[in-house]
Amino acid sequence: MISKIDQFLKNEIERLQREDVYRSLRMIEGPLDSTVIIDGQEVIILSSNNYLGLATHPLLKKEAVSVIWRLGVGTGASRLISGNMRIHEELEKRIAGFKKCEDAIYFSSGYMANIGLITSLAGEGDLIISDELNHASIIDGCRLSKAETRVFPHRNIDSLRKILLNDNMNSYRNGYKKRIIITDGIFSMDGDIAPLAEILEVAKVFDSFVIVDDAHATGVLGDNGNGTAEYFGLKDENLIQMGTFSKALGTMGGYVSGSSLLIDYLKNKARSFIYSTSPPPSICASSIAAIDIIENEPEIRKRLWRNINRLKRGLDDLGFNTIDSQTQIVPLLIGDISLTRNFTNLIFERGIYAPLIRPPTVPEGMSRIRLSLMATHTDEQINRVLSVFEDVGRRLRVI
């Protein structure tokens, strides 16, 4: 006899399967390099956020192991109880220096950083204006904050301005205490870059401040890999920068950088910081090493951008729709879920792993193959990818 809860779950899973949005896990064996073993087959991986290949870098591994022997594997408490170790504060000082800010705060994940930041700064009586393609952690943070949230069309500055203009004209009725504009730096599904300079100009006119999520931009954008603000040459006191270590920096955790007052406030208000056990010291040690490498070895980032340009140019020449990608995230827009799945399966048979991205992660009719480049991909691997994609694309009449 099946229980009521199991019957409900069974029905929901069957519904997901009927709607072709059911998901399952693929198990990877071995280290996350440019090639991995999946289902016993060696494949070129084009789905990892390990953009600079630092997750397997010898220095990061050395530092992590050294600290494990010295300090152990866990902290046993939240930072405000007894889980605040010297190495946590050392990492935060390194983040602040790297981001050219007064101070920084380290969270257990990027998701927790956005949840903590947004819910601490926004509440009832405030207005959040969010780009429609912002990450799920931003969307969830907006919902949990209880602030009024309005969504503007992707990267559309005119629409953003109109929302704030209308609010300003009706301010006697709305009476918002704070106005907060939130955007990704690099958008995780389209690979394009937020027009941050224009957003900051609008924010200044309408007495708003801006949060930029640099999860995919940290270590990638800017002359020194500092992110979106450096890429545009911006320094603004109304800008709050959030980011992660789990992508280009190869480790784990999220951060917020800004003024010392902001960081002090978050330590006292951000529930995802206050009520989470602090990250293990080994992760902090490897994260510090990752910042050192990004600052001292710019050639790694240059190799990534060479790979980006090589693959993007090849795909565009073949006639694939890569939307408006400008970065290491390169979408191949196909549209139909079944056709996109066929494409994924066929390239996997040929030794390339790049997953299907479908609703609800992307809008209906916008299913795609999402490619993400790494600095460790070789010229031979990129040539192989282009050759296989050309064959499969013509076979399925995608190009």
Image: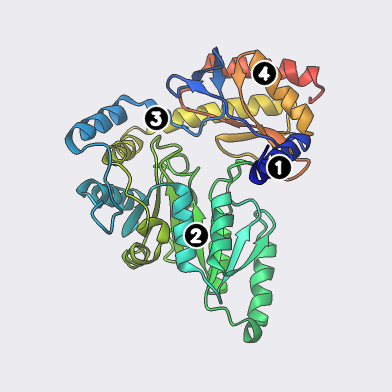
Density class for disc 1 (Cα within 10 Å; few <14, some 14-19, many ≥20) is few
User: Image quarter for residue 174?
Assistant: bottom right
Mark 4 and mark 1 lie on one chain; the one further toward the N terminus is 1
Residue at which label 2 appears: 211
Amino acid under disc 1: Glu
In percent of width and height, residue 349 lies at 66, 14
- Please report contact status of discs 4 and 3: CB closer than 8 Å, yes or no: no
The reply to whether residue 227 is visible in this rendering is no
Amino acid under disc 3: Ala
Amino acid under disc 4: Ile
Mark 4 and mark 3 lie on one chain; the one further toward the N terminus is 3
In percent of width and height, residue 260 lies at 31, 64
Residue at which label 3 appears: 55
Question: Depth check: 244 or 195 in front?
Answer: 244
Residue at which label 4 appears: 347
User: Image quarter for residue 320?
Assistant: top right
